[in-house]
Image (tube, rainbow, N blue to C red):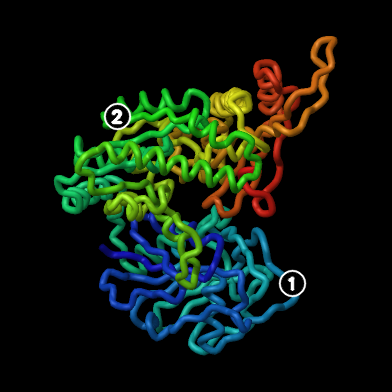
Amino acid sequence: MEKIIILDFGSQTTQLIGRRVRELNTFCEIMPYNKFPKDDPDIIGVILSGSPLSVYADDAFHINFDEIRGKYPILGICYGAQLMAHTFGGKVESEGTREYGRANLEYMEEGNPLLKDFAPNSQVWMSHGDTITKLPEGFRVIASTSTVKFAAFAANNEKIWGVQYHPEVFHSIDGTQLLKNFVVDICGGKQDWSSEHFVEQTVKELREQVGDDKVILGLSGGVDSSVAAVLLNKAIGKNLTCIFVNNGLLRKNEFTDVMRDYECLGLNVIGVDASEKFYSELAGVREPEKKRKIIGKGFIDVFEAEARKIEGAQWLAQGTIYPDRIESLNITGKVIKSHHNVGGLPEKMGLKLCEPLRWLFKDEVRRVGRSMGMPEHLITRHPFPGPGLAVRILGDITPEKVRILQDADDIFIRGLREWKTKLSGEEARKVLAAGVPANMTNGEIEVSLYDQIWQAGAILLSDIRSVGVMGDERTYESVVALRAVESVDGMTADWCHLPYDFLAKVSNDIINHVKGVNRVVYDISSKPPATIEWE
């Protein structure tokens, strides 16, 4: 299968480059900068990502261009462009003025294939502290802004291009067009990578991989494990057994609601209510990391006990997706974290590992789910932390605190789903690109706040007693914080500017209907420095 290789130099937007290429229905792989697959006959082009480093610094990342130059079309983005300029004999310097934010291409070379179908004065997004001050011999400028002379360049007699801006972000209006020009026109991509093609191919591969063996899958209620389950069920049917563990820390009514959804999908699911076990083991525990470890070990214990009841099982399936695998390696190729949802279980139970979604980004997982007819509320479900509400309760865990947080969180999430807003322009493009079903009328779409947000939830500040007045009485009750963020990959995130009217309504509803709460606040911290969760 033909593919684009993206060499990662440590940019926070490398995954976004991969997603944009995938949106062009072209397969791609993200590799550490020093792990280029030399003997892969399916490679049709190479993209060099950005980086937080300076190309001339002692610790800068470099590659052996002999492995790719003259063999594949090459596109350098930001650091990738500067690396080529520096390596090939040009000059990259820090001129004392950093270039961040929107800019416009005031000059574009007419007829250059990389800039085909660009709008005049096309808006781009700059994000670099260094700049190219001299191009190598045999290269020419093809685009400039008012402050960046070499905003884009090309080799005279080679298929090499570089851009000092970021075409992968939505602020670069013709960014997707540039990537299409490179991937499709220059590299010759056939654009035959689609969700329907993925389902067909993966079902075939799963049948070959698993055969008549029995497979066990741990469900979380999230989109990744749910889509993996439906895909496996399509491939092997009754030989798949799913296990859904209720640790008592799920959202309100989630255990019964999700079990009902899974039954409607025709899945063979064992539901295990282990909430009392988790409450008992978490009693009096306040330290966040200790809570996480208790919950992780408890899940493995419950899952293993149930799994061992299934005779003849030979495979453990997981909803591991491509970003999980990428993030399990740093750019030097060393493992920095485990990506497995039930890490250690395959070896412990003597099972082989099956990961049917291992090549997909999150938005692709959702597209695959839609192509298989899964209900939209399962597909669009926000990410939810593995330890559940335990990392959204500051302090120790009790059933009463869980009850308070479940009720407050339910009001918040239902409110986000019910509150509709109209979007146009760049905001509408972002939502539609994420795969959210919406019809455009007069240049506008109407979607819920929930569909505009990457992740949202309520946090219980259980150790704080807030003074309040209800009726004629003074109260000392808990504080609930609301959190809503937008993000591409979860590595960075920014708080969402929710409408004041919405926040006022939700705050009023929580205080009026959730016993034990008399104050609601909204978290306006970004990541970094703050995490998405509070613990």
Above or below residue 332? Residue 532 is: above
**Lower sequence index among marks 1 and 2:** 1
Q: Secondary structure at mark 2?
A: loop
Image side of residue 132 versus residue 4, left or right:
right
Q: Mark 1 — residue?
A: 97
Query: Between 522 and 472, which is closer to the camera in this rendering?
Result: 472
Task: Tell me the kind of residue under disc 2.
Answer: Leu
Residue name at image x 42 percent, y 23 percent: 256
Q: Is residue 128 above or below residue 285?
A: below
- For residue 265, which numbered disc appears in the image? 2
- Which residue is rendered at x = 48% and y = 29% of the image? 275
Q: Which amino acid lies under the numbered mark 1 shown in the image of this protein? A: Thr
Left or right, 345 with respect to 175, comes to left
Residue 419 position, x and y percent, is: 58, 26
Choose between 197 and 520: the one closer to the eye: 520
Residue furthest left in the image = 212
Quadrant showing the C terminus: top right
Label 1: element kind: loop
Q: Give neighbour class at mark 1: few <14, some 14-19, many 20+ (Cα, 10 Å).
A: few
**Crowd tier of the residue under label 2, counting other residues whose Cα lies within 10 Å: few below 14, some 14–19, many 20 or above:** some
What is the number of callouts on the image?
Answer: 2
Marks 1 and 2 in Cβ contact (< 8 Å): no
Q: Nearer the viewer, mark 1 or mark 2?
A: 2
The residue at the point 27 percent across, 69 percent down is 42
- Residue 445 in percent (x, y) is at 51, 34
Let me know if residue 364 appears in the view.
Answer: yes
**Quadrant the N terminus occupies:** bottom left
Q: Nearer the viewer, residue 167 or 471?
A: 471
Splitting the image into 4 quarters, where does residue 313 fall? top left
Position above or below: 197 against 55: above
